[in-house]
Image (cartoon, grey):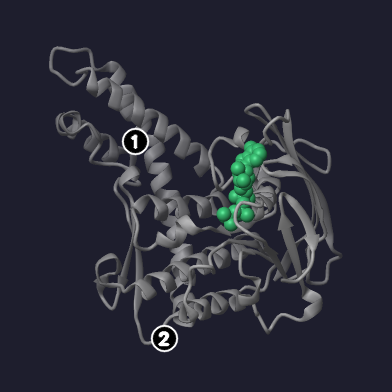
Amino acid sequence: MNRLELERLSVRGLRVLSRVDMEPAPRLNVVWGNNGHGKTSVLEAIYFAATSKSFRTSRVGELVRHGEQAASVKARFVERGGALPALAREQTAAVQGKRVAVHIDGNRPRALVEYATRSPVVVFHPEELTLSSGPAQGRRTLLDRLALFTRPESADARARYAHALKARHELLRRGADIPSSDTRELDAFEELCAEHGAALTRARAAAAEALVVELAGAFAQIAAPDLRLEARYAPGGSADVETARAELLRGRKRDAFRASAGFGPHRDELELRLDGHPARIVASQGQHRALTLALKAAETATIAKERGIEPLLLLDDVSSELDPERTGALFSFLALHRGQIFLTTTRPELIRAEDIPAEGRCDFRVFRGELDEGAG
Ligand SMILES: Nc1ncnc2c1ncn2[C@@H]1O[C@H](COP(=O)(O)OP(=O)(O)OP(=O)(O)O)[C@@H](O)[C@H]1O
């Protein structure tokens, strides 16, 4: 399997980082420092360089450092492995106001999804610690991230579905379903909901199928191997356009009354069961932590398989709240990953990772938005 490596990163005017240049180590990079000094911003800069997005906000304009006009990042990514020579490229992403501009080796990609999947990264941040115990939205987002790799056109279907669903909801709110009204507009939006919703359902089903293959093995390695985990995609809609259209038509009255649609992929769930029982109900806190780590490991493995390269792993402050047992689970998770890792922490002394040789590791201290090489 090829590996993806970030060899060089330059950041200008992104959040608290005025000017940062770094040359990461090939395996493990520990970014450490006190709260609020810019550790997460370093990961955010890497994520922005790789995807043109932020994992903290949907408004990338927020990345621009206060008082500056624009934020920009330049990253040199290299793919290595196998018999072929290393493949290097320079990716740049910049944001000014709300506008994002991206280039690969100086050229604009045809579509943002092409840019976002070229150098795959998987990020794990504190809000995701509730991935298995929290609302279904987190698990849907996980499937959507995978679908970008398994079916890139799903990003378009997802955006169009959300738009059509909102329009249908607005029409129902205005009483478009009552018998005397003209329902042509409502029919048209339901048609779009059915078409794009079915495409999204198919994409998520394929993503879940790929994820489930990896999940059981990852969980067995991270948690107790005698605990049986089953994962299953439970669609809230249908992969069949005709069925979806009929269900939407049938549900108009109910949906108008409830002010939400009772049918469609916005109600999808990725069901997780431990020894036959719903994990949300029976799992202990420690088991949820292991499940979440296993989901992230499976996400990483699925993307690796689809793209044929090990993605970069960005771990934001996921170790500081962990007790020794859970820290052990985190290191089992890291041991599963053969690609390059970036990890932030306020406590670098906890990051031992003995199986990584000294030349594969670099520690960076962040202090008031400036970065220096140095162990904690
Ligand atoms: N657009 C911006 N311009 C300048 N500074 C910003 C901007 N957005 C956030 N900040 C500042 O960046 C700092 C937070 O940086 P960051 O979240 O990267 O720190 P951190 O070291 O990861 O902190 P923690 O350990 O608490 O998670 C805060 O001081 C915040 O006020």
Query: What residue lies at 52% left-to-right and 81% top-to-bottom?
Result: 328
Q: Is residue 313 above or below residue 336?
A: above
Q: Is residue 7 above or below residue 25?
A: above
Residue 225, which numbered label?
2
Q: Is residue 86 above or below residue 197?
A: below
Q: Position of residue 344 (x, y in %)?
A: 63, 62
**Left or right, residue 341 beside residue 90:** left
SS for tag 1?
helix
Q: Is residue 135 visible?
A: yes
In front of the other: 104 or 123: 123
Badge 1 amino acid: Ala
Packing grade of label 2 (10 A; few <14, some 14-19, many >=20) is: few
**Left or right, residue 44 beside residue 139:** right
Quarter the N terminus occupies:
bottom right
Instruction: Kindly identify which residue carries mark 1.
Output: 194
Q: Residue furthest right?
A: 85
In front of the other: 202 or 102: 102
Badge 2 amino acid: Pro
Q: Is residue 112 visible?
A: no
Query: What residue lies at 84% left-to-right and 63% top-to-bottom?
Result: 86
SS for tag 2?
loop
Query: What residue lies at 35% left-to-right and 57% top-to-bottom?
Result: 134
Residue 334, which numbered label?
none
Q: Position of residue 210 (x, y in %)?
A: 48, 63
Q: Quadrant of residue 247?
A: top left
Q: Position of residue 265 (x, y in %)?
A: 34, 44
Quarter the C terminus occupies:
bottom right
Q: From mark 2 to mark 1, how far is it between C-alphas?
A: 41 Å
Query: Cβ of disc 1 within 8 Å of ligand 1?
Result: no
Q: Is residue 248 above or below residue 120?
A: above
Packing grade of label 1 (10 A; few <14, some 14-19, many >=20) is: many
